[in-house]
Image (spheres, rainbow, N blue to C red):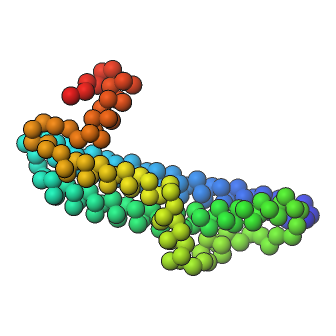
Amino acid sequence: MDDDKRSVAIEELKLLSAIIGRIEGTIFQRHAWLFSLITALALALFNKHPLICKQQFLFISSFTTIVFWITDAIQRVPVHRAIERSKIVEEALRKNSYLCTPLISDELSNGKNFVDFLHCAFRLRVWIPIICCFYFFLDSSLTNHYSGAVPPSMNLIFQFLSHEYPAISVR
């Protein structure tokens, strides 16, 4: 591989890295929005005079989480494709072999959309936060919050926070 092709391949790696970083940043922002919405719903449920009932909490939070999970998986498809393309570029650079570059737009737009979606949707890093949210929903929905009881999952969070930040008191 001559120096011009090598420098183009390195620039493609830089662009792919920037694309991956930008999309991952928006995914983390969306996770923050999801957790903020769930926290607001939990506050409405655990209020002294609840603003929503357990069933409403379970339905709204589950629906919201499923929508966020689908959008998370959809947005991870180009990340998956960019990672696959970067593996190809890195391999060509290591072997010093010929590489047709740049192919960023082709690689990010071509593929089996549904198969790539399923591949991304059921990756561990995508569905583990969703499973944790559903555990919290079920835990919150089954707890008798009218008596002032906090679900065990929230109690663990409060204990951790009170240990890390002594100003927060545990009920």
Residue nearest the viewer, comparing 38 with 15: 38
Q: Quadrant of residue 107?
A: bottom right
Whether residue 40 sits left or right of residue 34 in the image: it is left
Residue name at image x 90 percent, y 65 percent: 1
Q: Quadrant of residue 128?
A: bottom left
Residue nearest the viewer, comparing 76 with 9: 76
In the rendered image, residue 76, in percent from the top left (x then y), is placed at 52, 63
Seen from this angle, which residue lies furthest right? 2
In the rendered image, residue 45, in percent from the top left (x then y), is placed at 16, 47
- The relative height of residue 47 versus residue 4 in the rendered view (above or below) is above
Whether residue 91 sits left or right of residue 34 in the image: it is right
In the rendered image, residue 65, in percent from the top left (x then y), is placed at 33, 59
Seen from this angle, which residue lies furthest left? 49
Residue name at image x 64 percent, y 64 percent: 82
Residue nearest the viewer, comparing 26 with 158: 158
Question: Can residue 42 be seen here?
Answer: yes
Residue nearest the viewer, comparing 17 with 91: 91
In the rendered image, residue 121, in percent from the top left (x then y), is placed at 47, 65
For the C terminus, the quadrant is top left
Question: Can residue 38 be seen here?
Answer: no
Residue name at image x 37 percent, y 61 percent: 68
Residue name at image x 45 percent, y 61 percent: 72
